Each structure stands twice: as C-alpha cells, then as structure tokens.
Image (cartoon, rainbow, N blue to C red):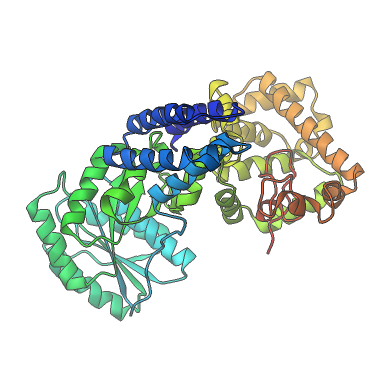
Amino acid sequence: MFDSLSDRLGGVFDGLRGRGALKEQDVRDAMREVRIALLEADVALPVVRRFIDAVTEKAIGADVLKSVTPGQQVIKIVSDELVEMLGGEETVGLDLDAKPPVVIMMVGLQGSGKTTSTAKLAKFIREKHGKKAMMASLDVNRPAAQEQLAVLGEQIEVATLPIVEGQQPVDIARRALEAAKLQSADVLMLDTAGRLHVDEALMAEMKAVSAISAPQEVLLVVDSLTGQDAVNVAKSFTDEVPLTGVILTRMDGDARGGAALSMRHVTGKPIKFAGTGEKLDALEAFHPKRVADRILGMGDVVSLVEKAAATINEEDAEAMAKRMAKGQFDLNDLRTQLQQMNNMGGLGMLAGMMPGMKKAKAALANSGMDDKVLVHMDAIIGSMTPKERANPALLNAKRKRRIAAGAGKDVQDVNKLLKMYKEMSRAMKQIKKMGGLKGLGAMFGKGGLDAALGSGGPGLGGPGGMGGGGMPPGLPGLGGPKKK
C-alpha cells in the first residue's frame, strides 16, 4: 500500500534528517522533490499545489529552521498536512443512528467492486456494530449480479432479498424496504446497478432509488488502482448524488496512492472504508492518521494490534505463553506462530505496519522471500509425525529426507527451518533464565516494557502480548496472550 510513494518520500526525508541545520532553500528543494513524488503518484494537481504551499509556508518559519532538529520538524509538518489531506484526525464511521431499517445505498461504476464491498460492509456491520443487516441487489443490467450477491450473502450469513425476474430497480427497492421491516433488519443495504461510465440514465436511476428509500448513507465505491480516473468518477457522482462517504477498493495493491490522497479534497466527503484484499473480511475503517503514518514509513502499530486481536485465538495464546514461561517451545508452537503470521496478512503486511521496518520489508522482497515461505514452512512441519514435532531431536538425516519428500521441498529447506527453530528455542531459554516475561520487562525499569515503551508501542511483548504492546507472533515467540 503506497509503497512507491512511501519510498520516494523516505528518500527525501532521509536527506533532511541527516543535516544538522536547514536553510530555506533546503526546504524548498525538498518540497520540489515531494511535489514530483505526489504528481508521479497520480495525486490531483490542485491537491498537490495546496499541500506543497501549506507545508512550505510552515516549514520555512523561523521556529523550524532554528530548531535543534529542523529535519524532524519538517517531517512533522508534512505528516500533519497529509492527515489533513486524507480527512483530518478523526475517523468518520457509518451513521446508523436512525429509525430501522437504516438504508445504506451503494453506488459506483461497473467493475469497481461494489457488490463485493456491499457484502464486506454487511459483514462488518454485523460483527463490529452487532446489527442485523439485509442486502438487496438492484442491478438488473449486469448478468448474474443479483445471483452473485445472493451467493455472497450465504457465505457471510446475511439475508438477501429473493430475486423476482423482470422487476425494475425502484420496485426492488420498495420491496426490499418492506422485507427489511418484516424481518426486523436494523440495516438495509442496496447494491445499485453500475455502468461502464457515468451517464444520464444511471444518474436518473440513482435519484429515483434514493427518493424511494431515503438512504441514511450513500457510499461511492471506487477502485483506487484507477488513480486519477477514480477521482474523476467521484467528482461526477458528487455533482449528481448526495454522497456521504467513499469506499476505496483494492487499496492493498495501490502502490501510488493518488486516489486516496485526492479523494477528500475533490469530493468533500470522507473516505470511510478501504478494501484491502479479496477475502470478505478484508475491509478496514479508514483512519487518516494511520494511513499517513504508513505513507511516511512510521508504521501502524494500532492497526497491527487490532488485526492481531481479531485473528489470534486467545486460548492458544495463553497456552503458548504458559509453555514459554517454562522455557518450553517445540515445532507445534512454531507452527502455531507461523499460522498466526499468515492470518494477520503475512510477512509483507506485518513489516509494512511496524515502525522502522520499511527497509526490512524491501529486503524481504529483494531476497525473494514472500508469504509463500510461511506456507512452505507449515508444509514441512505438517510432514512430520506428532512425535517429531514434539521432540525435534529425533530428526536424523533419514527422517529429514522423508519429511522433505513429503512436503515437496529439499532437505536444505528442512535444515533452515530447524535452524530457525533452534534460535527461537534458545531465545525462550534465555528469557526463562531472566525470570520469564516479567523478569525481562523488569529490566526496562519500573512497570516493565509497557511503561518503558508506552502502552501499545512495538515492545518485546509483556504479558499483554499483541493486545498490550508486544511483538507480533512469529518474531522470536515473545508475544503473550492478548488482554481480555
């Protein structure tokens, strides 16, 4: 996410940090580089101009240039302006405070991911807000569009309006409202028809459906990978439909970030959600501050903790913490941690969300390591017998050859895995000698690591583990169970 833009800006700011003093020309030269980086990221020109002018005006002030750390001050200003560009400090969520059924109308062009986003949001509403949702497809133009939503509804266990052949969108919306009331649904989601481009017929249909359903939220779904085209589409819809927010899809593949950075300025509406993958739970609330931190390579520890809390099984984490406190760590434990890392998005996702790990993420990519490595390691461990996983000392040359053949890998790969296990096991024993996790925390001063590094910071993993500032699972196994 935003990798190319982040790399460009990182290079500019590394130059600023390395200088003890800054002149006004140094700042202007840096801002010229930032301007080029934003334009290459496909950010709208008016947005770039406004951003550069605001940053330059503040950065060439006497307080900054005469500061002890002028480079850091400039970066802070850039960070603040990025947050402002993305929508401000506060996250704008869904407005569900109305008499049920609250209607959410999904609009957008064909191929933007509207139907999938409808299902993702329905799942999000049920799991995060605890409300009963119902979905209805108003798309009578695209073949099998209504059937697609029905299939997705079954997968996420959310009711969809039965299909009646030949009904027009306005009639479907009216029937959906009646059905939602009868079924006591808290939220009704209307997946409207898309087009290949904005036209009068589409807008007329949107307005007619809006008049019938009186939606509380009108969310525009746009594909972030289309860059400036996404911004133009958003502008067209803003002029015709009373939008309340935007959902950006395929944000996980958006290396540039032009759509995200331009959207708020162009539409005047907040980005409320970001689609971050194909899975039906790959939808995140959009947090401007967290996104700005990711762009500037500062990581996103809060999102990392939330992701861990959602994916890590608490009972497994507590059982593993007890074993680690005793200095116990076998290949079953290693396998559990590898699976946790995979569930949290893999090596690249974790590295991108941890402060200071941007270069480590690049190193992973350059070395040819990717998330398939986790799958391969899991396959190797899965090829072992229960006794071998519990007691790796049994693994002689003959057993290693059998395991490698069973996993479809080389003996060398088995040896690499065992070397990694031995290093982690050694780390566990060292922690036990220091008095366990509590003893390790005490070394950092009164109150342990959470006090020393700040609650929620990227610590080494006190008793709170990922829920209270620990390292993510899989990095020498120091993450304890999440807090209840």
- Residue appearing at x 40%, y 45% in the figure: 278
Q: Nearer the viewer, residue 176 or 358?
A: 358
For the N terminus, give its image quadrant: top left
Residue 272 visible in the shown view: yes
For the C terminus, give its image quadrant: bottom right
The number of callouts visible is: 0
Image spot of residue 147 (x, y percent): 25, 55
- Residue appearing at x 43%, y 53% in the figure: 286
Instruction: Answer with left or right where residue 2 lies relative to residue 447.
Output: left
Instruction: Answer with left or right where residue 173 lies relative to residue 12.
Output: left
Instruction: Answer with left or right where residue 59 lies relative to residue 462.
Output: left
Image spot of residue 279 (x, y percent): 43, 48
- Residue appearing at x 90%, y 48% in the figure: 435
Image spot of residue 116 (x, y percent): 33, 52
Q: Nearer the viewer, residue 336 or 173?
A: 173
Residue 109 visible in the shown view: no
Q: Nearer the viewer, residue 128 or 411?
A: 128
The image quarter containing residue 138 is bottom left
- Residue appearing at x 75%, y 25% in the figure: 399
The image quarter containing residue 206 is bottom left
Identify whether 364 is placed above or below 185. above
| Residue at the far left in the pictured view | 200
Instruction: Answer with left or right where residue 236 lies relative to residue 273.
Output: left
Image spot of residue 349 (x, y percent): 53, 39
Identify whether 112 is placed above or below 127. above
